[in-house]
Image: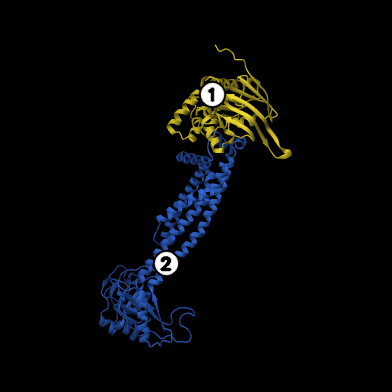
Chain colours: A yellow, B blue
Amino acid sequence: MAAGAPLITFDKVWKSYGQGEAKVHALAGVDLAIRRGEFVAIMGPSGSGKSTAMNIIGCLDTPTAGTYSFMGVDAGRLDRNRRAMLRNLYVGFVFQGYNLLARTTAAENVELPLIYRGVASRERRDLAMQALAQVGLVGREHHTPAELSGGQQQRVAIARAIVTRPTLLVADEPTGNLDTARTHEIMELLTRLNRELGLTITMVTHEADVAEYAERTIRFLDGHVASDSTKLEVAQP
Amino acid sequence: MIWETVRLSLRSIRRNVLRSFLTLLGIVIGVAAVIAMLTIGSGTTQKVKADIAKLGSNLLVVRAGRPAGPGGPGGLDQAVRPLAEKDLAALVAHLSGARAISPASQKQVRVIFGTESLTSGVTGTDSAYLDARDWKLASGRPFSDSETRSGTGVCLIGETVRQQFFGAGDPEGETIRVNRTSCKIIGLLEPKGYTGFGQDQDNVVLMPLHAYQRRIAGNRDIDNIYIAADDRTPTSELQPRVEDILRDARRVTPDRESDFAIRDMTQIADAMASATTTMTGMLGAVAGVSLLVGGIGIMNIMLVSVTERTREIGIRLAIGAHEKHILIQFLVEATVLSLLGGIIGILIGLSLAGLASVTLTIPFAPSPAVILLAVGFSALIGMVFGFFPALRGARLDPIDALRHE
C-alpha cells in the first residue's frame, strides 16, 4: 500500500501528570503525523515522553490537551470501551516481555483478540493457524509459552497482534529481551509484515541498530520531538 | 462467549486445585449443613405427623381435671372429680358427629404367662375403642357387648406381648395373668410400632372396662374418653358440643371452669409439626450463616485472583476486551466456584441426611425445592461476592495493569 493520508496525527498534544508545582509534562505540545504503511522507530532516553506517545498512539491513553486523531477519528475523546473497540479492530500490540497468557497454548493466545471480536470458534482456529504460519511457527500451535524460546514467544505475540489484520502495529521494545541473532530474525519478520501486508508499524527502541530497520526515526527529548528523520529510499532490486 | 468464559474459569480453578478446594470449603459446609438440616427436619416432621396419625387422627381425648393453662392443670382449689360412667352415657346419648365414643382407663401392670413376665400397659375399655383409635385386629375378635357389660376376663394383646410370651405362635385361647386375675386371650392387635417419644404402642393388653375396674383399678373411674369424629365433622366443631354435654352431665355451673379437659389430637399434631418446622427453620438459618462466611471466603480469593492476574487483565484490555468482558470473566469464575461448592455441599448434605434417617429411623425426605434453592443460592453467593473483585479487575487501567509485576 502506498503511503497516503495520515493515519495518525498529533496536534499540539500535551500529557501532564500531577497538580500545580509538581506538575510534570510527559508530552509538551507534540505535533506529529504518521502515514499508512510507514515503519517508524521512536527513540529517546527514559522520561523523554516516548512511552507516553506510544500509549496514546495505541489508543491506550488519552492526551490532557490537544488532539490525537487515529484514522480520522478523534481518539483522544473516546471513552474506555470505544478505545478498546478501536484497539481490537485496528491495533496490534507487541511488548518487550511478550505478555502471553501463561499455561495457554500458542494457538489460544493468538485466538484471544478474536474472542473479543465475537468470531466463531472454528474460524478463530483457522485464522490463528494462518497467523502462526505467517510468523513461521507451524507445528508449535499447542506449545505453551513455557515450552517456547524467547524468540518463539515473541513470534506468537506478533501472530496475536496480526491475527485481526490490524492497520497499525504498536511494538514496545520488541527485541529488548532477545539476543542479537533473535533480534535480527524478529526485525526481519516485522520488516516483511510492513512490506508485504502494508502494515503500519510504530516501534519504541533504544538500540540504534534496531531502529535501522525502520524507514523513519523520531527522537523524543523532554516531551518534545527532537528530531524526525526519514531514510533516503533505497532502490529495491 | 459464555461457554468460553465458563471453560476459562474451570481451567483457572483446576490450576489452583488446593486453593480452590479450600475456598469452596465454606460453601460446601454451609450448603451441606442447610441441606442436611432441612432434609432431616422434614423427615422428622413427617415422622411426627405419622406418629400422631397412629394415635388416631380426628380424635378428641377427654380427661378429668382442669384444662392445662396458666396456673397449671388440677389447681388446688378443687379436687379432681374423675370421669364416670354417666358422663360416657351422656355423650353416647346426646353427641352427634362422632364415629366412636369409648372409655379407657390405663395402668402399667405386670403380666405373667408361665414363667415369663412383662410390664405392660393394661387398658380397660369397650368394643368401640378399636374403632376410636383406628386400630385393627390381626386375628381373633373384639369384646362382645355382653363381655364389656359383665366384665368377663377376656383380653386382646399387642404384638410385643405376643412375642414375649408366644414368639411367633398363635396366642388365641391362652390364658395370661394380669395382676392376680387371669384373662383369656381372644384376639391379637395389629402392630403399630413406636411413637416419636419412644413409647412401644404394641406392649398393651386390652380388657373390658368393668373387668379392669373391678380386678385391677379397684374403683369405678374412667381415665379418658376417646371420641373419634366422623368424616363430615371437624374436631374443632365437635369439641364445643362435647364440652356442653359434659358440663351439663357433670353439673358445672356457668360461672365455673370446666373440671375436665378436651385434647384435640389434630391440633396437637399440627402444633408439633409446626414446632418441628420452626426448629428446622432456625437450624437452617444458623447453617445459612456459614454460607455467608463461605461467600466472604470467595470474595477474598477472587480479590487475590484479580491481583495475581493483573497483567493478564492488562493484556486482555490492551487487545480489545471491554470492561464487561473482564467483569463477566471473573464473575463467571466466582459463580462456577461457588456453584461447584454448592453441588458438593448438596451431595454431602444428602448423604448426612440419609445416614441420619437410618440411625434415627425417620423417613429420608429430600426436597427438590430445597435442593434447587441451594443450587440457586450458592450461584447467587458467587455472583454477589464475586462482583466487587470482578469490578475491580474490570476497572483497571490497561497501562498500569501491563506494568504490574
Q: Residues within 10 Å of mark 2 (few under 14, many from 20)?
A: many
Q: Is residue B72 left or right of residue B308?
A: left
Residue B224 point in image, percent of width and height: 37, 80
**Above or below, B401 relative to B229:** above
| C-beta proximity under 8 Å, tags 1 and 2 | no
Q: Say whether residue A175 is visible.
A: no
Three-letter code for the amino acid on which mark 1 is drawn: Leu
**What residue appears at the point 56 percent right and 44 percent down from the top-left corner?**
B391
Above or below for B174 versus B310: below
The quarter of the picture where the C terminus of chain B appears is: top right
Task: Give the x, y percent position of residue A83.
Answer: 55, 35
Foreground pick, B99 / B47: B99
Residue B23 can be seen, yes or no: yes
The residue carrying mark 1 is A199
Residue B11: x percent and y percent? 49, 39
In the rendered image, the vertical position of residue A49 relative to residue A37, given as above or below: below
Residue designated by label 2:
B273
**Residue B179 position by quadrant:** bottom left
